[in-house]
Every structure is written in C-alpha cells, then in structure tokens.
Amino acid sequence: MTVETRIDRRFAALKRDGRAALVTFVTAGDPDYETCARLLAGLPAAGADVIELGMPFSDPMADGPTIQASSQRALAAGQTMRKTLALVAGFRKQDRDTPIVLMGYYNPIYVYPAEAFLDDAKAAGVDGLIVVDVPPEADDELCLPAAGRGLSFIRLATPTTDSRRLPAVLANSSGFVYYVSITGITGTATPDVEAVHAQVDRIRRATTLPVAVGFGVRTPEQAEAIARGADGVVVGSALVEAIRRTLGPDGSATGQTVPAVLELVKSLGSGLRTAPGRPNMAG
C-alpha cells in the first residue's frame, strides 16, 4: 500500500491551485549552521513550496563553481551529515508540512553508513532523496531501502535521457521527477524554454509523477516561463550566489545574508502565484 507523503500532498494542493511549485535549494550549513537554520525557517513564508537541502561533499562533480563553493564553505564551518539531519529535525519543530528533500552524492551516505542514514533521515523528518550518482541499476543499494522507509527517491532526467533509458529512470521513482533543463553542470547556462516544455511533455506521457525543472533558472521571468509547462521550478545557484554576495570579508554571514535570500525567494514565488501556468497534466 502506497502511503501519501508530504511531497504528494504539496503537489496535489498546488495542482488544485493551478500553479507550479517553487522548489528552493540551499546547501546545509552554508555559510554556517545557525545562519542556515534561520534561512530554512524563513523559506516557507517567503514562498518555498518544497525545500532541497544540499548534503555538503568535497567533490560535487555535477555542480558548478557556485554550489561547489557553498559545499566548501559549509565543510569549513564544520558541517557534517549528522548536523544536516539536525537542521531538518530543528525545522520540523516549527513546520510539519513543507517537504524537505536531501540532495547530493552517495559517498557521505555510504560512510554514515547507508542503513543508519535512512533510519535517521526518516526520524529527522526528511521526505525524499536526490542522490545524483546512484543509477537505477543500483536501486537495491539505496532507492528501494529508502522507499521501504517511506522516503521518496527522486530521479533526474536530462535532455539526453532517451525513450530507451526513461523507463529505467522512472521505474522506482517517487515524489516527483527532476528534469535537468540543460546538459552540463549547475548554474552555467540558461534553459531553452520551448525545448524544456517539449521534454516535460515527453516525460509526462511516461509517468503520473509531477515534473519539476531545474538548472539555470535564476530570475522571476525565467521561473514564470518554465512554470507554464512544468509542475515545479527548482532554483538553486541563484540562491546560493545571493548568500555568497552578502558574506563579509572573512566569509562569514552578515545581517543581509538571510534577508537577501528570502527576498529573492519572494520575487521568484510571486511570478508563479500571479501568473499560473497551463493546466497540470500530471496525474
């Protein structure tokens, strides 16, 4: 029996409202634990519908310089996987509804180790995982054990995911599908909106899961345009860059760090609320 999750409820509610989700990404512990905790606490009121929380890693191979630097800042400030789960647990004391998805790489999970990580993640209030370097062929390693604990395992589809590969990507996916709008690393190009919409339509014909689009979305105008043909819009590098720009000369947070990020989230979310996209075809 499939149990409805926070992610399922959130996307269903947004579908009834006729708008796409704003999915926001920040790196856990960037630029420090306390600042990140304040940022997480403020994201839902600013307009974040789903929160992706990056798991800092020393070699984030799919990420561009902006998010790589955020991982380095977090690690330098002492962030660990246990502290990342503690951030989620602290968030859950005040917010029982906003979905949180941990995003990153398998190595920090493997050394935790994996089974204990899944148990602790569930206990902390994590809703799903995006682990970019665990392919469908290794579903027994993490995906299926996660699903057995009620954690959604969210897969990435890309412009190069053809019709032969797509069924494997979708087979054990849950929560939503994350469509990577460009080839390459994060934060380094701008998506072609028409091409993105065509790819989202192709994925929708193969699954009832919502499709959220990320990589390269930086402005409210881009978010609004993408939202017209998707169930969600993911913004990451722009938020992480907003953190970086507000840091002091020594790299520490300033009084502008949290407000700057939350204001950007508000501006991104306002376009999705005032100009909803076309009817959601998922489901």
Image (cartoon, grey):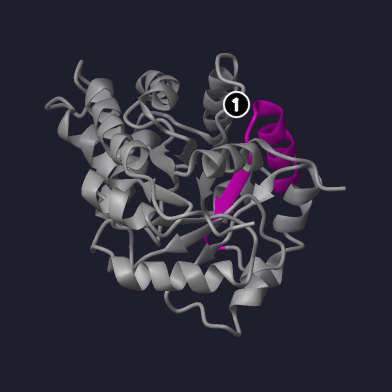
185 w.r.t. 97: above or below: below
For this orientation, the residue located farthest to the left is 249
For this orientation, the residue located farthest to the right is 1
Residue at 34% of width from left, 73% of height from top? 195
- Hey, what amino acid is under mark 1? Asp
Magenta stretch contains residue 234: no
Can residue 158 be seen? no
Task: Classify mark 1: residues with Cα within 10 Å, few (<14), some (14-19) or many (20+).
Answer: some
Can residue 130 be seen? yes
Residue 201 in the image, given as x and y percentages of width and height = 49, 70
| Magenta segment boundaries in residue numbering | 114-133
Residue 282 in the image, given as x and y percentages of width and height = 59, 58
Residue at 29% of width from left, 55% of height from top? 225
In screen coordinates, is 219 left or right of 107?
A: left
In screen coordinates, is 44 left or right of 187?
A: right
For this orientation, the residue located farthest to the bottom is 164
Residue at 59% of width from left, 14% of height from top? 93
Q: Secondary structure at mark 1?
A: loop
Say which residue label 1 marks: 97
Residue 139 in the image, given as x and y percentages of width and height = 72, 64
